[in-house]
Image (spheres, coloured by chain):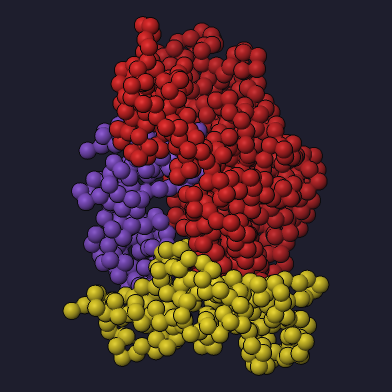
């Protein structure tokens, strides 16, 4: 992502330090991750120490400091889904993709995350892939669902 | 400046407006244990060792004295069965990280803290924040900061800034109660400083 | 768009909208909240539009995509007006029939109706469905009637009349008095009296002042704020502006978790509409009162639901809470007086202003007035969002509205208050729901999450789940929370994995006490609650895990074994084929045996064994019976059909 694009986003928020999180959210949303160069640019423009930005980028789980895969796999680990067996589904997803939550596989195909409550508790356990929610997923069905994604 | 009259452990202590209870106590020669307090730094309130009992307006409660502002008429107790029990457990939690840290030994003995109570943790860092805060507030270089949160929270140097600033400074080194800081610095120096 | 510059303008516009609407005109409303969207209501909406077009009815029948109706278990939900016929679990395939028979001919399609299990009768009208009949939907009810993206719809149901009344017929002091008399307590977790909070800010001699909507809704399993913001954002805005007027704040913030993109979108649309009409901005309705609203998104941190952490996040920092020795209504955002309240709290304000504190206090218990929206989820038949008066019993909510526990399983506990709350066991089911009542029982109201668990849920693992959640969500600044939870999680994990030791419960209790007394913020102070409440009511489960290495709920993987009963197994090979680690030996008509060394306790065999055989069982705390010798494993067949 080039500096111009980053500057545009910063200017849209009037270059205010209090908008730091909103700026980073926009960069994350467009670029799918936050490269170090982007953080450095934001640090310069908003006149905020890089340590503060680094803390924000690691404290808040919406941000990724590493590139993401083609397909974002989110499994809900909220209480209702937990009670309906989400941990077993997570185990299966980990086995199938070879990665842990927070990681991306070496082919940059899947990124796996746990999320806390997608608000579809009636469908639990829920696995959301690229924004589409798959409900009532059992461990054996998880494999079927993942196969549909290239 | 208005004068505030307080009572700490039965002694009368005069404080200035804007002082914290800890500052007032230390000024009067009354000891209250703490790990994360430093006179040159803004209060942090992280270690909670400086907990005291305060009584004001008919209410008694436990507060953290490095943050709580002195009040006129405040009655303060720095030791009690409850306070001591809490400090003992807090020390045991710290000792799980740094059982041999000199800064903790005397306190551990005084409060009867058992260094083996909890399973040992891998990291020596006790999260006092002195290094991060000193570099930010006193030196204003921001070479080291915190990352992540919860049990994943750690200190982290910014290699480019550290390479530039630290070799001629290292004023934060003596502040670290467990020497974890020095170890972290050596690692980042060896692995990540720009060539 | 001419701005509304007086109450008269507002009323005129409202009358214009109402007179342009025909109550008898057919309208198909389709729930389009996030949960129904996840079950496909988007496709249903497209199908309805297409079918109406095909049948030449597009200009005679309206479609209204509304907010969440609350009966999430049975979505997508369609309600046909003016008759009020309610159809559940609609798919695009049902649409042609609905248009042809119900819209054209006025016929009711029985198979799409809700069936009341107690009388086995189909119910036509939404309001008669037991799930809805027993609710009191003062705040949430409007969701079903309005398109959240339409200001006209909100005006049509009386929207912004409370704002007009507050600005022109009441002084700020009078509004404050009304809110105080109503005893409106915060619906986000703390249950603090809103009127008292507002008064503190109003009296604080500092400027500028701020009002803030806490829409972080971090409790997993709670999604009522989401549905309110998605389905009726104007109700929240109206309450917020009234709050600003009362304390003298001219700037408001809505902090929404970024996991709620539809809420952010609908809120943005609502703000834009309100600004266009002079209901936000300078000189609102010609009153001389200025007020603007900004939306900030969260970035994935549960701790930001804590009020001081939220304010710190609004300042563009990490969400680390601050000590509350000076309350945030005096020194809050940027050190200025700030009133922070939850979404549902703000949504109650227009109702209180319009209908009065006396009306509001008719419902509820001594200390808890009005209604509360709960998200009823977990092991429950009718999952969804329910709004009931304070004082209704848990039994009524779980059985009369929730329809009880699915699969004929036994109720075990209901967890309220999210990760800061606790479990209420069966013997307390007649507890009247209220702030103080729940706190006394060892739990709390929290934001209104109500998670039902049954006999298959291990309460020790449940506590471990919450503590684990909190170890990751804690900001990590203070020792008692960060390190205390770290050790508590370790001990609870050890207990669940068969490594529990005598003295563990006492150590957990001591760590709990330290967290409660010494933590910096409410996250740490309430973190031990899930453990404390489960050990209070289910101590026997803890003792079984520690002393007998047995999990009574047959849930903890390390403490259970799967066993195929040789008396029941019919050798059908279904489980054998399904086992992911090929741990089952056997063949057609040969008794199957699980190799315990290969078994990963995934539970697939139990899931797939045909009900009529039910040959797989879980055992815990006792050794697995040795397998029959191979020679004895043949099943004498008499041509029995395989499963």
Q: Residue at x 30, y 36 (%)?
A: C581
Q: Residue furthest top?
A: C639
Left or right: B72 in relation to C586: right
Q: Residue furthest left?
A: B195
Residue C328 visible to the viewer: no
The chain assigned the colour red in the figure is: C
x and y, in percent, of residue C494 in the image: 49, 54
x and y, in percent, of residue C326 in the image: 66, 71
Closer to the camera, C568 or B164? C568
The chain assigned the colour purple in the figure is: A
Query: Which quadrant would residue C409 be assigned to in this image?
Result: top right
Closer to the camera, A23 or A77? A77
x and y, in percent, of residue C221 in the image: 53, 43
Q: Residue at x 63, y 71 (%)?
A: B86
Image position of C543 with respect to C24: above or below: below
Report the quarter where the C terminus of chain C lies: top left
Q: Residue at x 67, y 43 (%)?
A: C424
Q: Residue at x 49, y 58 (%)?
A: C490
Image position of C493 with respect to A7: above or below: above
Q: What colour is chain B? A: yellow
Image position of B113 with respect to C196: above or below: below
Left or right: A12 in relation to C175: left
Image position of C114 with respect to A55: above or below: above
x and y, in percent, of residue C405 in the image: 59, 29
Left or right: B101 in relation to C411: left
């Amino acid at each position: 992502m080039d500096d111009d694009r980053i500057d545009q986003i910063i200017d849209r928020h009037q270059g205010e330090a209090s908008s730091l999180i909103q700026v980073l959210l926009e960069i994350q949303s467009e670029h799918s991750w936050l490269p170090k160069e982007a953080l450095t640019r934001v640090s310069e423009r908003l006149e905020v120490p890089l340590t503060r930005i680094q803390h924000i980028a690691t404290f808040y789980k919406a941000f990724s400091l590493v590139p993401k895969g083609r397909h974002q796999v989110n499994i809900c680990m909220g209480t209702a889904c937990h009670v309906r067996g989400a941990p077993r589904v997570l185990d299966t997803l980990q086995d199938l993709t070879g990665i842990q939550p927070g990681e991306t596989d070496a082919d940059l195909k899947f990124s796996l995350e746990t999320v806390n409550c997608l608000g579809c508790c009636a469908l639990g356990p829920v696995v959301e892939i690229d924004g589409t929610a798959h409900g009532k997923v059992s461990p054996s069905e998880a494999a079927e669902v993942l196969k549909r994604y290239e | 400046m208005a004068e505030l009259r307080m009572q700490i452990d039965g002694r009368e202590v005069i404080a200035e407006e804007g002082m914290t209870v800890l500052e007032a106590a230390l000024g009067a020669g009354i000891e209250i244990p703490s790990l994360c307090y430093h006179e040159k730094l803004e209060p942090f309130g992280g270690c909670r060792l400086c907990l005291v009992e305060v009584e004001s307006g008919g209410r008694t409660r436990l507060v953290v004295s490095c943050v709580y502002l002195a009040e006129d008429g405040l009655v303060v107790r720095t030791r009690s069965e409850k306070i001591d029990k809490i400090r003992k457990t807090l020390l045991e939690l710290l000792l799980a990280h740094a059982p041999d840290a000199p800064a903790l030994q005397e306190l551990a003995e005084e409060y009867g803290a058992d260094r083996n109570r909890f399973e040992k943790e891998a990291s020596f860092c006790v999260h006092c924040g002195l290094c991060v805060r000193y570099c930010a507030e006193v030196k204003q270089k921001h070479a080291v900061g915190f990352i992540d949160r919860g049990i994943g929270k750690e200190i982290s140097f910014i290699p480019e800034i550290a390479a530039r600033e630290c070799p001629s400074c290292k004023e934060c080194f003596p502040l670290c109660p467990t020497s974890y800081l020095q170890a972290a610095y050596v690692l980042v120096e060896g692995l990540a400083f720009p060539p | 768009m001419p701005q509304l510059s007086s109450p008269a303008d507002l009323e005129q516009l409202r009358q214009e909208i109402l007179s342009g609407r025909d109550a008898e005109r057919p309208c198909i409303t389709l729930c389009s909240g996030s949960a129904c969207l996840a079950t496909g209501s988007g496709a249903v909406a497209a199908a309805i539009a297409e079918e109406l077009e095909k049948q030449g009815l597009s200009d005679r029948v309206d479609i209204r995509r509304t907010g969440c109706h609350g009966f999430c278990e049975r979505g997508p939900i369609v309600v046909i007006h003016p008759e009020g016929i309610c159809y559940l679990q609609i798919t695009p395939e049902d649409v042609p029939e609905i248009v042809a028979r119900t819209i054209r001919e006025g016929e009711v399609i029985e198979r799409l109706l809700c069936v009341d299990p107690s009388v086995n009768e189909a119910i036509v009208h939404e309001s008669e469905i037991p799930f809805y009949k027993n609710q009191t939907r003062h705040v949430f009810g409007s969701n079903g009637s309005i398109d959240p993206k339409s200001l006209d719809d909100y005006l049509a149901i009386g929207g912004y009349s409370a704002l007009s009344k507050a600005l022109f017929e009441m002084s700020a002091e009078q509004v404050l008095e009304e809110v105080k008399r109503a005893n409106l307590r915060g619906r986000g977790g703390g249950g603090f009296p809103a009127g008292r909070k507002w008064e503190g800010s109003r009296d604080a001699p500092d400027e500028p002042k701020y009002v803030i909507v806490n829409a972080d809704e971090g409790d997993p399993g709670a999604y009522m704020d989401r549905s309110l913001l998605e389905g009726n954002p104007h109700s929240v805005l109206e309450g917020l502006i009234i709050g600003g007027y009362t304390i003298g704040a001219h700037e408001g913030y809505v902090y929404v978790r970024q996991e709620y993109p539809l809420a952010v979108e609908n809120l943005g649309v609502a703000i834009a509409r309100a600004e266009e009409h002079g209901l936000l901005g300078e000189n609102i309705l010609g009153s001389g009162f200025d007020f603007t609203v900004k939306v900030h998104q969260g970035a994935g941190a549960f701790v930001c639901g804590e009020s001081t952490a939220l304010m710190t996040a609004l300042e563009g920092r990490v969400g680390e809470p601050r000590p509350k020795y000076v309350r945030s209504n005096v020194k809050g955002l940027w050190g200025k007086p700030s009133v922070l309240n939850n979404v549902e709290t703000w949504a109650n304000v227009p109702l209180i202003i319009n209908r009065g504190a006396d009306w509001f206090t008719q419902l509820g218990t001594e200390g808890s007035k009005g209604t509360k929206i709960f998200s009823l989820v977990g092991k429950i038949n009718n999952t969804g969002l329910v709004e009931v008066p304070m004082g209704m019993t848990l039994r009524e909510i779980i059985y009369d509205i929730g329809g009880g526990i699915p699969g004929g399983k036994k109720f075990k506990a209901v967890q309220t208050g999210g990760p800061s709350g606790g479990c209420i066991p069966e013997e307390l089911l007649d507890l009247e729901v209220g702030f103080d009542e729940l706190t006394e029982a060892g739990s709390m109201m929290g934001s209104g999450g109500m998670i039902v668990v049954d006999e298959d849920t291990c309460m020790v693992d449940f506590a471990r789940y919450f503590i684990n959640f909190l170890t990751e969500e804690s900001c990590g600044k203070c020792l008692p929370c960060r390190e205390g939870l770290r050790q508590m999680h370790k001990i609870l994990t050890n207990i669940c994995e068969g490594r529990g030791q005598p003295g563990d419960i006492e150590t957990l209790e001591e760590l709990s006490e330290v967290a409660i007394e010494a933590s910096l913020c409410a996250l740490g102070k309430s973190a031990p609650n899930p453990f404390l409440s489960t050990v209070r009511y289910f101590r026997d489960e803890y003792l079984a895990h520690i002393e007998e290495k047995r999990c009574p709920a047959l849930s903890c993987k390390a403490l259970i074994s799967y066993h195929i009963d040789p008396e029941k197994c019919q050798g059908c090979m279904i489980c054998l084929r399904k086992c992911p680690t090929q741990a089952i030996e056997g063949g057609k008509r040969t008794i199957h045996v699980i190799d315990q060394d290969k078994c990963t306790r995934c539970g697939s065999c139990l899931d797939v064994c045909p009900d009529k055989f039910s040959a797989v069982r879980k055992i815990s705390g006792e050794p697995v019976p040795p397998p029959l010798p191979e020679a004895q494993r043949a099943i004498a067949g008499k041509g029995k059909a395989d499963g």
